[in-house]
């Protein structure tokens, strides 16, 4: 399957490299795309292509895909999901939102949640937040660990050790996925602090957006720098050659949507996707079926 890359994604990929810095990524970047209209055409084309590719993925039933979206509040996860999935066959896709864990989830290993919802071959799952929250929100609020019933030995070694252990476990988990043809596409929507403020204010000003406003989000915003540190550390530690992280600028919604669709389609077209070949016995069966229909 051919795909002509509209964007050069290379600058959005996080290299597996200790000195990489999030600050080098401009949330307002539009990667040379001039305006909303140019991005809209690109998105439309990619959405159509995604529908085609999904059909082959489904028919072939060889690969499963997990699109992971991580972001601060109001970065545009919901709108991105809505637009990017709009052309897909609902029977082959699923969205899993990783909200604050239930007691049952808390009292399991943190990779139990994604393991339970790993898509079957042929399917695409979209994770709206993910197990990465366990090294993000939990890192910013380490008291959340108190409710997790972790082994005393692990707790005694300290927080740094816990995050490092979790990064290693995530990498091992994703390697296990990869060797089973479960392909994660990991996307961080990089919104700026200023743009988040503007979007929160919009939610307060516009009665039709009031419902989106959540007072807790303002509290989390107060921890902005700690979140950015957690994100930077996590991105460095878990971006691998096989499963890289993409940092997608998120201050312009029209750019974010087009870029995410483009990253997904370009990753999918790297897979060896094809319709199953019908064997010769089955070919004879098809001919037989044709005859039956024609002789009705
Ligand atoms: P939206 O607000 O657009 O509906 P959302 O993803 O922000 O989407 P919320 O229900 O507002 O959904 O927030 C989910 C909250 O759950 C987030 O603050 C997130 O950090 C938190 N969360 C997710 N996973 C965990 C976890 N493992 N431990 C603790 N908190 C978590
Ligand atoms: Mg929220």
Image: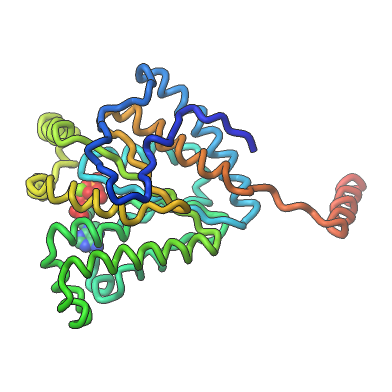
166 displayed left or right of 230: right
- 261 and 235: which is toward the camera: 235
170 displayed left or right of 2: left
| Residue 207 visible to the viewer | no
Q: Quadrant of residue 4?
A: top right
- 204 and 166: which is toward the camera: 166
279 displayed left or right of 47: right
Q: Quadrant of residue 34?
A: top left
**Residue visible at 35% across and 28% down in the picture:** 255
| Residue 193 visible to the viewer | yes
* Residue 155 horizontal/vertical position (percent): 17, 76
* Residue 190 horizontal/vertical position (percent): 26, 39
* Residue 207 horizontal/vertical position (percent): 14, 32
Q: Where is the N terminus found, in terms of image quarters?
A: top right
- 218 and 184: which is toward the camera: 184
291 displayed left or right of 255: right
* Residue 120 horizontal/vertical position (percent): 53, 61
Visual colour scheme: rainbow
**Residue visible at 13% across and 51% down in the picture:** 226
Question: Farthest residue toward the bottom?
Answer: 152
- 240 and 271: which is toward the camera: 240
Circle count: 0
Residue 183, compared with residue 180, is above or below; it is above
Residue 5, compared with residue 211, is above or below; it is above
Residue 221, compared with residue 159, is above or below; it is above
**Residue visible at 14% across and 37% down in the picture:** 210
Residue 284, compared with residue 76, is above or below; it is below
């Amino acid at each position: 399957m051919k795909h002509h890359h509209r964007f050069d994604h290379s600058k959005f990929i996080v290299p597996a490299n200790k000195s990489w810095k999030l600050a080098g990524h401009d949330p307002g970047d539009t990667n040379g795309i001039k305006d909303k209209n140019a991005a809209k055409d690109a998105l439309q084309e990619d959405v159509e292509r995604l529908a085609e590719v999904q059909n082959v993925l489904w028919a072939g039933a060889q690969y499963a895909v997990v699109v992971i979206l991580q972001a601060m509040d109001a970065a545009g996860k919901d709108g991105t999901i809505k637009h990017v999935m709009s052309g897909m066959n609902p029977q082959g896709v699923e969205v899993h939102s990783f909200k604050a864990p239930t007691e049952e989830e808390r009292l399991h290993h943190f990779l139990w949640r994604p393991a339970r919802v790993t898509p079957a071959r042929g399917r695409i799952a979209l994770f709206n937040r993910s197990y990465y929250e366990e090294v993000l929100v939990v890192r910013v609020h380490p008291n959340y660990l108190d409710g997790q019933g972790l082994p005393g030995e692990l707790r005694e070694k300290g927080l740094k050790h816990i995050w490092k252990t979790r990064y290693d476990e995530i990498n091992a988990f994703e390697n296990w996925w990869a060797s089973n043809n479960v392909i994660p596409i990991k996307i961080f929507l990089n919104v700026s602090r200023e743009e988040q403020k503007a979007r929160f204010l919009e939610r307060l000003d516009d009665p039709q957006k009031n419902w989106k406003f959540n007072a807790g989000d303002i509290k989390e915003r107060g921890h902005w720098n700690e979140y950015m540190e957690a994100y930077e550390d996590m991105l460095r530690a878990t971006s691998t050659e096989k499963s890289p992280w993409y940092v997608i600028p998120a201050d312009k919604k029209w750019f974010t949507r087009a870029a995410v669709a483009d990253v997904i389609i370009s990753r999918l077209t790297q897979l060896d996707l094809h319709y199953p070949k019908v064997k010769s016995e089955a070919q004879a069966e098809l001919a037989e079926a044709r005859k039956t229909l024609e002789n009705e």
